[in-house]
Image: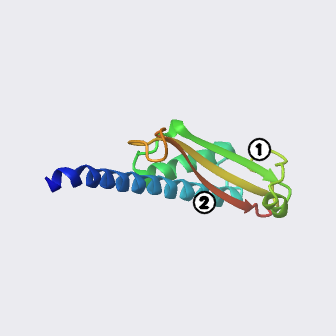
């Protein structure tokens, strides 16, 4: 009798813990992808055969695939960048001067977001959540 009363609650707790672990796992991967993309973009590295924007986006998708082993669907990944004249204007939530990866000396905000349908709704009635990884940097003089 006690098992019949406790089992549903216990199963719910186990599934909720599993779901939260997955959310944290994907969130960590998004932050790592933003960090690696910014590290690549800060130095203006470029393959002569691939445009800079494409190379940075490929770096993000590569890191996500490596970290999550295919859990993250690349079609649901959004990469947003904004170039600011300097770091104080980025910190003040100013308006970006362009939605590019910036030029030498500009501050750039990398945001990698992922829309994910969770296993079951934990927070409210929707099982869709948006996870984000954000990294601000200042491009080196190149």
Q: Is residue 43 visible?
A: no
The local secondary structure at tag 2 comes to helix
Does residue 88 appear left or right of residue 134 in this picture? right
Q: What separation in Å lies between label 2 and label 1 (alpha carbons)?
A: 18 Å
Relative image position of residue 7 (x, y in whole percent): 22, 52
Q: Quadrant of residue 79?
A: top right
Relative image position of residue 102 (x, y in whole percent): 78, 51
Q: Residue at x 48, y 47 (%)?
A: 123
Does residue 45 appear left or right of residue 98 in this picture? left
Q: Quadrant of residue 3?
A: bottom left
Read off the residue under disc 1.
99
Q: Quadrant of the C terminus?
A: bottom right
Q: How many marks?
A: 2
Read off the residue under disc 2.
35
Q: From the viewer's side, name the closer residue of 14 and 111.
A: 14
Q: Is residue 93 above or below residue 140?
A: above
């Amino acid at each position: 009798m006690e098992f019949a009363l406790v089992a549903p609650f216990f199963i719910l707790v186990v599934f909720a813990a599993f779901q939260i672990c997955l959310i944290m796992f994907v969130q960590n991967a998004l932050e790592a992808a933003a960090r690696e993309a910014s590290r690549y973009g800060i130095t203006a590295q470029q393959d002569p055969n691939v445009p800079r924007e494409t190379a940075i986006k490929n770096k993000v998708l590569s890191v996500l695939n490596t970290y999550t082993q295919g859990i993250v669907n690349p079609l649901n990944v959004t990469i947003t960048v904004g170039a600011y004249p300097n770091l104080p204007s980025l910190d003040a939530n100013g308006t970006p001067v362009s939605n590019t990866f910036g030029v030498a000396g500009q501050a750039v905000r990398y945001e990698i977001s992922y829309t994910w349908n969770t296993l079951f709704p934990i927070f409210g009635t929707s099982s869709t959540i948006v996870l984000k990884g954000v990294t601000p940097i200042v491009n080196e003089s190149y």
